């Protein structure tokens, strides 16, 4: 199930109006609608806020129940290096990955 479909389903289950949820997230209703229709993806911070607001995990929202492929040694090495950076540098890397992900229509959650 897509991110948007999950978000739509969660809002309906909880009887939350899109307008109210958009206001809670400090985004416009049209921005929230773009997430629900899968025409855009929120950044990692907003995904975390959405998950917390709806009392679900980010893994659930992003449908990470089953990994398509195992984590490679190169990916683990990247994560080790990322964790060794100071907070400001980590935020810079996450920002860059978010921008590249948007460019390539891929969503990553590095928190």
Image (cartoon, rainbow, N blue to C red):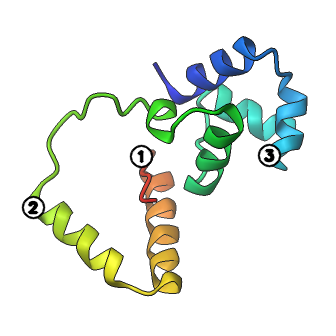
Residue 105 vs 63, above or below: the answer is below
Using the image as rendered, state which of residue 58 and residue 26 is in the foreground: 58
Residue at which label 3 appears? 25
Horizontal side of residue 19 vs 88, given as left or right: right
- Name the image quarter holding residue 74: bottom left
As drawn, the label of residue 73 is 2
Image location (x, y in percent) of residue 75: 19, 61
Q: Is residue 64 above or below residue 14?
A: below
Is residue 100 shown left or right of residue 6? Answer: left
Give the alpha-carbon distance from disc 1 to disc 3, as whole Å: 22 Å
- CA–CA distance in space, label 1 to label 2: 21 Å
Can you say whether 36 is above or below 12 in the image?
below
Q: Position of residue 3 (x, y in %)?
A: 53, 29
Q: Which mark is residue 106?
A: 1
Q: Tell me the residue at 45%/45% (across/down).
A: 105
Q: Residues within 10 Å of mark 1 (few under 14, many from 20)?
A: few
Location of residue 32 (image quadrant): top right
Between 105 and 46, which is closer to the camera in this rendering?
A: 46
Q: Residue 74 versus residue 54: which sits nearer the camera? A: 54
**Is disc 3 in contact with disc 2, using a CB cutoff of under 8 Å?**
no
Q: Are marks 1 and 2 in contact (CB under 8 Å)?
A: no
Q: Which of disc 3 and disc 1 is earlier in sequence? A: 3
N-term-proximal mark, 3 vs 2: 3
Secondary structure beneath label 3: helix
Q: Position of residue 34 (x, y in %)?
A: 70, 34
Of mark 1 and mark 2, the one earlier in the sequence is 2
Callout 2 secondary element: helix
Estimate the spatial distance between the alpha carbons at disc 3 and disc 2, rounded to whole Å.
Answer: 36 Å
């Amino acid at each position: 199930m897509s991110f948007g479909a999950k978000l739509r389903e969660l809002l309906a289950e909880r009887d939350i109006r899109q307008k109210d949820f958009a206001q809670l997230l400090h985004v416009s209703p049209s921005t929230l609608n773009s997430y629900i229709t899968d025409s855009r993806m929120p950044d990692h911070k907003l995904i975390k806020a959405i998950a917390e607001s709806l009392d679900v995990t980010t893994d659930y929202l992003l449908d990470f129940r089953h990994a398509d492929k195992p984590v490679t040694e190169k990916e683990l090495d990247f994560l080790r290096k990322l964790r060794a950076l100071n907070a400001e540098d980590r935020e810079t890397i996450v920002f860059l990955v978010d921008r590249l992900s948007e460019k390539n229509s891929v969503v990553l959650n590095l928190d």
